[in-house]
Image (tube, rainbow, N blue to C red):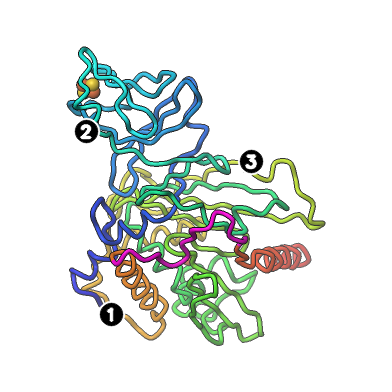
Amino acid sequence: MLTQEENDLITRIGPGTPAGAVLRMYWHPISLARDIDDEHPTKFVRILGEDLVIFKDKSGRMGLLADHCSHRGASLVYGRVEERGISCAYHGWLYDCEGNILETPPERNDAIMKSVKQTAYPVQVYLGMVWAYMGPLPAPPMVHYDTLFRKDGTRVWLIHPKLNANWFQAMENSMDPAHLQILHQEFIGRGRKPPSTTRGFTDDVESYEFFVTDYGALMKKRTYVNGMVDEHPVLFPNILRQGASSQFRVPIDDTHTMHMRMFFYPTEDGSEPEDAFDPEITFEDPIKEDPEKSHPETRFILHSVNSQDQMAWETQGPISNRSAEHLSYSDRGVVLLRRHMKEQIERVARGEDPLGYQRDPDHPMIDTNIDEGVRQLRQDRANLTRRA
Ligand code: FES
Ligand SMILES: [Fe+2]
């Protein structure tokens, strides 16, 4: 159980919030890159509670600026892109990708051009996504996780429906191994029926453990009665690594979250395919009868593991009321995650680097053990084929 203040501290991520400061220390995928092209050179996005516009100028540079123009607030979504940046549609103030004001029609106001800057954040296009960094400059390098940087495999993005809930509910779920055997019992039995729907396949599991890895991830580990082990690291702060996939939970604001999953499939012979960094982009089918609404005005369609998870996260409420919860022994991974979040908040407030943060642009690739995840996946598929 948390007090309301503690709950606010770890969940609220808008500008000026302590948890928002932690999330702003990392690069996040914020949009499909293909959404911004010559025909549609601007796109509105809300990220970490900030209203922003992605744009591509006529020199091919991409920028991310605050939506409201510094002059009198019209949206830059309707700006005209030019060689040197984007010009507000209302009175023509011209901004470059760094937020500098280059022109202030109808007059030239040097005082304003020197003293005012439009909020601007660095962006880069990588793996078919626009990534943004919204923290203090200089921007760090993107963390070299194997799933993002290995050359010997192919990648697929799966874009899940928007989550109408706070990002931290999804992250707590990632440190909650007990729910797998119960919530997802219809999908994990491999043809077996659980002894009871209350316990699902709980009795398949011998033990759960949690620890911090040497590269700064929070690990949840299940050891099964049959000796099998699975380990799923949470790459701090908002990525779950599991099997062949990495699930990104990017806060739109305090009560909405983007949920995107990238699969990385290593080649069996170690070869490096040409399209390794050009993932196919796929979308999950709707998971609610009315996809725009939230519980209880709509009903979830529980046709997949993800839809079951999103049901659990959303029905906890827009921001789960942790002052009313009753944690049990099996929730100790959730407690660990909250403690780490609080510690990172304190570290960032002291000016220190949070967990998993990298400063060296040439830091070595981080091995999140994807080969084991893929090996298990292939073995599962082979077993299923043998049974069919
Ligand atoms: S509101 Fe943008 S230039 Fe006036
Ligand atoms: Fe789950």
Please give the residue where the numbered disc 1 appears in the rendered image: 326
Q: Quadrant of the N terminus?
A: bottom left
Query: Looking at numbered disc 2 in the image, what kind of residue is underneath it?
Result: Ser
Label 3: how many Cα within 10 Å (few below 14, some 14–19, many 20+): some
Residue 84 at x, y percent in the picture: 41, 22
Q: Residue at x 39, y 79 (%)?
A: 331
When the figure is inspected, residue 326 is found, relative to residue 172, above or below; the finding is below
Q: Secondary structure at mark 2?
A: helix
Label 1: how many Cα within 10 Å (few below 14, some 14–19, many 20+): few
Q: Secondary structure at mark 1?
A: loop
Tell me which segment is drawn in magenta: 350-365
Check whether the beta carbons of the residues at disc 1 and disc 2 lie within 8 A of each other. no
Query: Looking at numbered disc 1 in the image, what kind of residue is underneath it?
Result: His
When the figure is inspected, residue 81 is found, relative to residue 297, above or below; the finding is above
Q: Please tell me whether mark 1 or mark 2 is closer to you in this view.
A: 2
Residue 257 at x, y percent in the picture: 37, 51
Image quarter for residue 128? top right
Q: Residue furthest top?
A: 106
- Would you say the beta carbon of the disc 2 residue lies within 8 angstroms of ligand 1? no
Q: Residue at x 45, y 27 (%)?
A: 56
Q: Indicate yes or no whether the magenta region holds residue 173.
A: no
Q: Please tell me whether mark 3 or mark 1 is closer to you in this view.
A: 3
Please give the residue where the numbered disc 2 appears in the rendered image: 115
Q: Please tell me the numbered disc located at residue 278.
A: 3
Distance from Cα at disc 1 to Cα at disc 2: 52 Å
Distance from Cα at disc 3 to Cα at disc 2: 41 Å
Check whether the beta carbons of the residues at disc 3 and disc 2 lie within 8 A of each other. no
Image quarter for residue 317? bottom left
Residue 115 at x, y percent in the picture: 21, 33
Image quarter for residue 348? bottom left
Label 2: how many Cα within 10 Å (few below 14, some 14–19, many 20+): few
When the figure is inspected, residue 284 is found, relative to residue 2, above or below; the finding is above
